[in-house]
Image: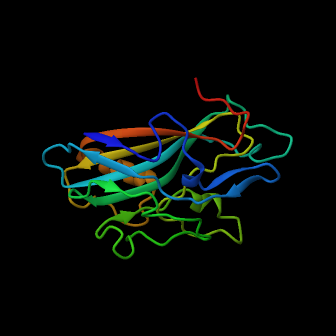
């Protein structure tokens, strides 16, 4: 199975237009275009009945003590955890690409609706809730249920460049047997017994000009 993007190359930096936020010299960060990247695929295995796309950042700080704090840095050695940015399931096997900006084009305060994909964007597909839902839970202006794609926004004082892993799964079921808000970990567990093939792309992103990549 082949999987690629015209928006960024595997192992390279993700352009700011596909991120939730970009660097700002005065305020550290500013909201960005938050467009979902382009993706395409081919050579699906025989028996593919649907596809699923899961996007996660495995480099999120396990503790928030120093996150986005003036005069502090999130250290490289801090243990890291997963943060899910997008789960898209029940992609019809007849679909061969996702266009840039097709599912997300701008930051939506309080989150985009879901899990059903609205309108004619991709009939039948479902989008899960992403982890900005928990991140903004205590913010009166931003809290809500964040479905669909919301791009990178790592801590602006993190010493580590974050990796964003985009994984496409070819599945043997037309509809993934999972219900509810389709949280990332729930989707990953549900698809394990149905994977015929998978392929991944990794993009890099940081809001800290001094950050370094993981070695």
Residue 187 visible? The answer is: yes
At horizontal 33% and vertical 74% (from top left) the residue drawn is 120
Q: Which x, y percent locates residue 159?
A: 71, 34
Quadrant of the image containing the C terminus: top right
At horizontal 72% and vertical 32% (from top left) the residue drawn is 75
Q: Residue reaching furthest top?
A: 215
Quadrant of the image containing the N terminus: top left
At horizontal 17% and vertical 43% (from top left) the residue drawn is 45
Q: What color scheme is it?
A: rainbow
In-image side of 45 versus 6 (left or right): left
Position of residue 126 relative to residue 154, above or below, is below
At horizontal 58% and vertical 69% (from top left) the residue drawn is 108
Please tell me in which quadrant of the rendered image residue 116 appears.
bottom left
How many numbered dots are placed on residues in this image?
0
| Of the pair 50 and 190, the residue shown nearer to us | 50
Q: Which x, y percent locates residue 113?
A: 48, 72
């Amino acid at each position: 199975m082949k999987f690629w993007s015209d928006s960024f190359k595997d192992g390279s930096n993700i352009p700011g237009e596909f991120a939730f936020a970009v660097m700002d010299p005065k305020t550290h960060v500013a909201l960005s275009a938050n467009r979902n990247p382009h993706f395409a695929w081919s050579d699906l295995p025989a028996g593919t009945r649907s596809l699923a796309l899961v996007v996660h950042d495995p480099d999120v700080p396990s503790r928030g003590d120093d996150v986005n704090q003036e005069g502090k840095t999130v250290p490289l050695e801090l243990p890291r955890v997963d943060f899910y940015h997008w789960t898209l399931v029940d992609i019809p096997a007849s679909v061969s690409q996702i266009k840039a900006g097709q599912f997300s084009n701008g930051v939506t305060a309080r989150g985009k609706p879901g899990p059903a994909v609205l309108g004619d964007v991709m009939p039948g597909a479902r989008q899960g809730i992403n982890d900005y839902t928990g991140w903004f839970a205590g913010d009166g202006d931003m809290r809500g249920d964040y479905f669909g794609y919301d791009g990178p926004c790592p801590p602006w004082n993190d010493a580590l460049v974050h990796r964003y892993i985009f994984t496409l799964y070819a599945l043997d079921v037309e509809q993934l047997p999972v219900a509810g808000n389709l949280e990332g970990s729930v989707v990953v567990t549900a698809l394990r017994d149905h994977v015929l093939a998978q392929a991944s792309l990794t993009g890099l992103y940081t809001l800290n000009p001094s950050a370094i990549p993981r070695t």
